[in-house]
Amino acid sequence: MTRLGLRARVTAAFAVGALLLAAVMALFSYDLTRRSLLDERERAAVRAAYYDAAVVRSGLDTGTPDVVAVLRSLDTGSSRRPLLHLRDGWYARTADVGAGSVPVELQRLVADGQPAVQRVRLDGQPTLLVGVPLSGERGYYELTSLREVEGTFQVVGLALTAVAIMVAGAGAALGWYATRHSVRPLTAVADAAERIAAGDFATRLDPTTDPDLTRLSTSFNHMVDQLVRRIERDRRFAADVSHELRSPLQTLAAAASVLTRRREHQDARTATAAGLVADEVARFQRLVDDLIQLARTEQPAHRDTVDVAALARAACRERALPESLVEVVDGTPARWRVDRRRVEQILLNLLDNAVRYGGGPVAVRLGLHDGIGVLEVDDEGPGVPEADREVIFDRFVRGRAAHARAGTDGTGLGLALVAQHAAAHGGHAAVVDREPGARFRVELPGAGA
């Protein structure tokens, strides 16, 4: 299960918090509004019922009262319906109102001379029933419809629900905005770390950007300073050691050359030993040269306009390979903005790697996509196992294909140099499968600038 990121979690928390707060406030507001409207409607209904009861009482106190006429004289509008209980029965202006409309308990209270109010549902409609006792065991009842009030409740409920949803959305937007600005310093740290990893050791954080993150910025800058000093110290050490080794190596190489030239004057055992010494001295010289190159890769790339296609053909000629191996993708310009020395070293090292471990190169492909230069070298070797595709670009690491070809004389630094030269351009090196063999790909951002 994929875990949500910090920004998504904070945004969700803001949204949920805002929704819960809005829901509580909406429920409280709805309940308060409902109570207020119902109480107001009940007070109005009671006042109207007492007024109408007084009119009915006056009409009944005449000598020969006309009950129906008395009820019809009431100005009850369309929302109130009168109901009168006398000794001889029930009287109403409409047939849908009768004794069954009044609960027994409420009838008993009114008969005992006590006014009563009760909310009931008649024909599925909410109704407020008010009972007013009259003299002589008579009772007046008035049924007030609450349908409009219920409609008002529905509108209020929908409005409060919409407000709660909008508040939740506003909370999510506020959370997103807050996290965007809160995480921005961390994004700056991540961007700076990526630039440093790409070889830009001049990158630093501004300690004055955010007072709350001054300690983080200062510690980060101090860490980078320490890292740069250590890298520079290691680079100087490797360069110094390599240069110091060159003089004795040249002496050893000269002595080995003399022994090799006088091989015909030596017995077989001595000649074999002299050949081994000469081979190892040559390998040692290549190792020292690679170490010097590796020390130089820590320096920034010096870009210039370079005919990369011509450079690739020259690299093939230098390794005694056919120039026809070079393929330029359609629409790709021949001239790129790159460091000539580094790109030349990338091409030579990839060709050497293909010759030693891949059965020889079969294609050198050049392409430019969205300003990113792509160099690819294909071979027909055994390929590179999945587990080795990252580590083979580390220093002094040789893949399984190299161990399988024990007779090769590689130093384990060729692909490390390729990766370092690519990183100096802000790019990277990788290897992918192809059938048959492997494809080494180097990407150089900014080559089309």
Image: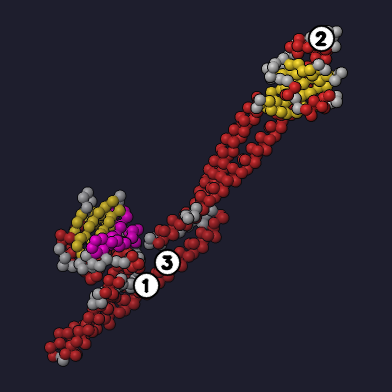
**Residue 281 located left or right of residue 58:** left
> Is 160 within the magenta?
no
Q: Residues within 10 Å of mark 3 (few under 14, many from 20)?
A: some
Q: Residue furthest bottom?
A: 267
Q: In this rendering, would 415 be left or right of 222?
A: left
* Residue 238 shows in the view: yes
Q: Which residue is mark 3?
A: 228
- Look at label 1 and name its amino acid: Arg
User: Residue 232: x, y in percent?
Assistant: 39, 69
Q: Label 1's element? A: helix
Residue 364: percent from left, percent from top: 21, 60
Q: Which residue is mark 1?
A: 236
24 over 338 or under it: above or below: above
Question: Which is nearer the eye, 29 or 352?
Answer: 29
Q: Which mark is residue 156?
A: none
Determine if the magenta segment contains residue 447: yes
* Tags 3 and 1 touching, CB below 8 Å: no
What segment carries the magenta color?
423-449
Q: Compared with residue 412, is residue 26 higher up or lower down, i.e. above or below?
A: above
> Circle 2 — which element?
loop
Residue on which the image places disc 2: 65
Which quarter of the picture shows residue 238? bottom left
Q: Residue furthest left?
A: 264
Q: Which amino acid type corresponds to the residue marked 3 in the rendered image?
A: Val
Residue under the image location 81 percent in, 11 percent down:
59
Please say if 388 is above or below 99. Answer: below
Q: Nearer the viewer, residue 369 or 381?
A: 381
Which amino acid lies under the numbered mark 2 shown in the image of this protein?
Answer: Pro
**Which residue is the extreme one toward the front?**
88
Q: Secondary structure at mark 3?
A: helix
